[in-house]
Amino acid sequence: MKITVIGGGPAGYVSALTAKRAGAEVFLIERDELGGTCLNRGCIPTKTVIHSLEILDKIKAQKYTRDTAFEISLDLSSIFQRKDSVVETQRKGLITLLKQSGVTIIKDDAYLISPKEVFLKNSSEKIISDKIIIATGSRPAELPILGFDGQRILSSDDLWNMREIPKSITIIGAGAIGCEFAWIFHLLGSKVTLIELMPRVLPMEDEEISKALERLFKKRKIDFHTGVKIEDLKKNEREVEITLSNGKNIISEKIVVSVGRAYNTDFLQGVEINFGPKGEILVDEFLQTNLEAVYAIGDVNGKWLLAHVAYKEGEIAAKNALGESLKMDYSVIPSTIFTVSEVASAGMRENEALQKGLKIRKGLFPFRAIGKAHAIGEIDGFVKVIAEEETDVLLGAHIIGPKASELIHELALAIKLKVKAKEVKELIHSHPTLSECIWEAVADIHGVAIHKIDR
C-alpha cells in the first residue's frame, strides 16, 4: 500500500511514521520545515522563551543575595539563540527519526489534483497513491481592519523576526495564544494591553479560571479590555492607535493580531472536497473526507487545533487508511496554556455540565495551602474539580497555578476512566508535592479537605 502525507507537522509526521511502521510505502511532503507551526513557530519556541524569561523573573522576585547592587539584565538575542538551538535540535531529531524509519521525505509544494494523485510543483512530478492524508495545518488569521504589514501590525509568526523589545504592545485576542504572548512581552518589559471581543479573557475556559487569570493580569499590571470591538485604526512609522467600542483609545508601538487560525487549503486543485463554514475540511468520525481515499487531520479539519490532538489524529488516520475502522475520541482532551500562571483543563466546564441538566458537586483547593507551592514561591491559583452528584463520577477538572500543564493528566485519566471523586481521594499523594492540591480538591467535593479552612 502506498500512502502520501501532505504536511510535515505533528499530524503529518506521526501519520507517516505510523503508516510506515505498519508496512506501507510512505511519502511525506513538506514545503517548509518539518515539525510544522508547533515546532518552528508555536509550541516549542514559545515555551522555550517563556522558560528562559520565567527563570529571570523568579530570580528578580526572590532574595538570593544581600548585595543591594545585584542586578539581572535581559539579552533578547541570547534568549532567541537558545530558542533557535532547541528548535534545531528537535528538528534534526525528527528528520533522523523519519529517515531511519524509511519514510521518503520530499521538500516541495504539493497540489492534490485527484483523490489519489499529487502534483509536485518544483519537480513537476506526480505521485499516485492508494490513500492520501492531508495534514497541511493552519496559519494566523487576519482581520479586515488589521492586515499584517510585518512592521506595526504583526501575526504571531512575525514576532520571531523582532530584534528589539517594543516599549508597548497591544494584543488583539485574549485566547490561549494572545495570553501567552502577553506574558512573554510583560516579562520582556513591554507595556502590554489585551483586547478581547468576548466578555472575559480565555473565554473558552471555565469562568472561575478566567476570572482568576484576570486578577493575576491586574496584579502584574497587564491591561485588558473585554467585551469590546475595534472601531478604528490609525498608524504611522512610530505607533498604532486603535479606537475601541467603549470609547477608549490605545496607542502602542506594535499590534499583534491573535484572533484565531485560517486553514491551509490552497493546495486543493481539481478535487471536490467538502468544507465547513470556517473553511475547514470536513471529516467523519474516522477522519475521512467525502472522498473515500482522502483523510484530513490536524488543524486543517478544524476539530481541535492542538498538537497533541494532531498526534492522535495522525495515528488514527494512518491506521484507518490501512484498513482499520477506528473512531477518533474527543471526549477528554487536556488543554494547557502557559501564561502569568499555567492554565489547564480536561472534561466538562461547570456551565457546560449545568446546561446539560446535570446535578453536580464541585471541589476547589488553593495552592497557597500547599507547602510545596510556598517552597517554590508560586502560591497563586487553585485546582477545581466537578463531579456528578448522584454517581460521584468526575466530569471535569480545571487548574490555574504552578505546573498545571503537568498536573492535569492525573485528572484527565480519572475523567476518561469515569473514576469517582472518593476513589481519587483514597490515592495517597506524595508530600511535599503540588499534586496534593488535587487530592485536597477532590476531597473538597464532599467537604473533607484536610487543610482547607474557608469552608
Image: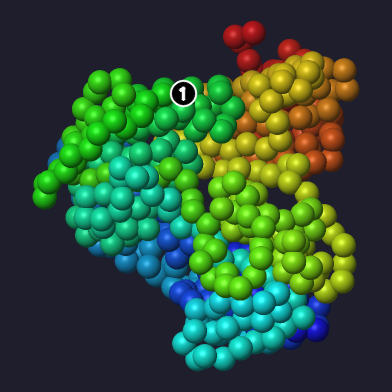
111 vs 432, nearest the viewer = 111
371 vs 297, nearest the viewer = 297
From what the image shows, is residue 283 above or below residue 230? below
Rendered residue at 48%/41% (across/down): 176
> Which of the 4 quarters of the picture holds residue 339?
top left
Relative image position of residue 132 (x, y in whole percent): 70, 74
Pointer 1: what residue?
Answer: 199
Locate residue 434 relative to residue 199 in the image: left or right.
right
Q: Secondary structure at mark 1?
A: loop
> Which of the 4 quarters of the picture holds residue 429?
top right
**Quadrant of the drawing holding the C terminus:** top right
Locate residue 422 relative to residue 202 in the image: left or right.
right
**Quadrant of the drawing holding the N terminus:** bottom right
Rendered residue at 73%/61% (across/down): 289
> Which of the 4 quarters of the picture holds residue 65?
top left
Relative image position of residue 105 (x, y in whole percent): 58, 84
Extreme-top residue of the structure? 455
Q: Is residue 431 visible?
A: no
Relative image position of residue 343 (x, y in whole percent): 54, 37
408 vs 14, nearest the viewer = 14
Relative image position of residue 97 (x, y in whole percent): 62, 79
Name the amino acid type tagged 1. Pro
147 vs 36, nearest the viewer = 147
From what the image shows, is residue 274 above or below residue 203? below
Rendered residue at 70%/74% (across/down): 115
Colour scheme of the rendered structure: rainbow
Q: Is residue 248 visible?
A: yes
